[in-house]
Amino acid sequence: MEKITVLGHKNQDTDATCAAMAMAELLNKTKQWEATAKISERPNQETAYILKHFKIKAPAKLKPGKEKAFFLVDFNEEEQSPIPFNKIEIEGLVDHHKLKIKLDKDYPIIFRVEPLGSACTIIAKIYQDYGVVLNKKTATLLLCGIISDTLKFASPTTTKEDRQIAKELANIAKIDTEELAGKMFEAKSDLSKLSPQEIINADYKEYRLDKKKIGIGVLETINPASALKKERKIRRALSESKKQNNLDFIFFGIVDILKKNTSFLLMGEEEEKLAVKAFGKGKIINGTINLPGITSRKKQIVPAFTKALK
Ligand SMILES: [Mn+2]
């Protein structure tokens, strides 16, 4: 059987990691490939908590150049790929983001993009389609991905299917979703061991929007005050990142999971203008714009910036 690497986006989050692990297992079980899930960075604090708590081994680190065949999960934009697309052969894709990739293949591949709250929801559905029974470990991983990406069903990206599948997974895994989500968000909100640069990069993505390169980092937290305490240092790290990555804009949003709002640190006039154009009404105070009801980068933030740049 041929070997394939299952891989999520750069700065992989819980959804990307769990989706890669579950998809690799499915490809092995259905004997389509000899599949291995890989990660490109150290697991973030939420993922690390999950792996430790459930005693699950983290995927191995990707060694670029070694593998050729790839199955991508939780992204399809080249800007977010750990390896340039011209260096790999994409043999499969499961995602829940806007479709950017253009694939020209001489043979059929697994290609599934659905507007659901989590890539893990789609993978749970593929297990059902293939008639493969989920074990406790994989059900746990998939449930964690859904809880993380939907902010425990609070994100506007959440669908009925996400809730339904999460319920089924919780039954298989024998997990109390409320309790697990609380622990995951606590782990995600602990900034004590992170440098300002690590805080920015923990959940950071780059996009090419109307020829502009834009970086958007978010920190989903139940304790926004602990991030605001480090605001000056975070801002310094943001201006460094903006220069280093040749960005036209950089944004960092502190997402209050409980109050369901986002505060964006605006780094300069360019960012202020774009934020006002994108979100209008919000008031800017001390270089920060507060946006009530905004929590989703995918469904609210990126579309608003895209429209504002047109
Ligand atoms: Mn995702």
Image (tube, rainbow, N blue to C red):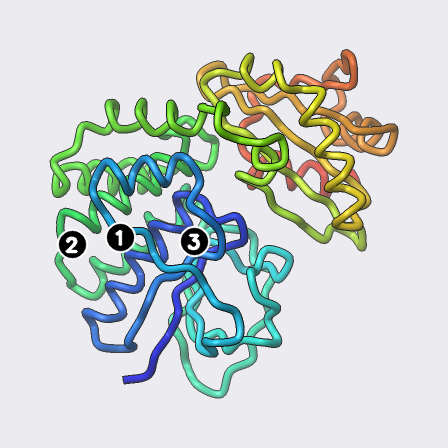
Residue situated in front as seen by the camera: 207 or 4? 4
Q: Nearer the viewer, mark 1 or mark 3?
A: 1
State the residue position of label 2.
134
The span from disc 1 to disc 2 (Cα, nearest Å) is 8 Å
Amino acid on which disc 1 is placed:
Ala
Q: Residues within 10 Å of mark 1 (few under 14, many from 20)?
A: many
Q: Earlier in the sequence, mark 2 or mark 3?
A: 3
Q: Residues within 10 Å of mark 2 (few under 14, many from 20)?
A: some
State the residue position of label 1.
124
| Residue 310 appears in the figure | no
Disc 2 CB within 8 Å of nearest ligand 1 atom = no
Q: Earlier in the sequence, mark 1 or mark 2?
A: 1
| Residue 302 appears in the figure | yes
Percent coordinates x, y for residue 305 in the rendering: 72, 38
State the residue position of label 3.
114
Amino acid on which disc 2 is placed:
Leu
* Residue name at image x 39 percent, y 69 percent: 5
The span from disc 1 to disc 3 (Cα, nearest Å) is 13 Å
**201 horizontally vs 250: left or right:** left
Amino acid on which disc 3 is placed:
Glu
The span from disc 2 to disc 3 (Cα, nearest Å) is 21 Å
Is the C-beta separation of discs 1 and 2 under 8 Å? Answer: yes
Q: Earlier in the sequence, mark 1 or mark 3?
A: 3
Q: Nearer the viewer, mark 2 or mark 3?
A: 2
Q: In the picture, residue 197 is in which quadrant?
A: top right
Residue situated in front as seen by the camera: 41 or 177? 41
Q: Quadrant of the C terminus?
A: top right
**255 horizontally vs 242: left or right:** left
Residue situated in front as seen by the camera: 231 or 264? 231
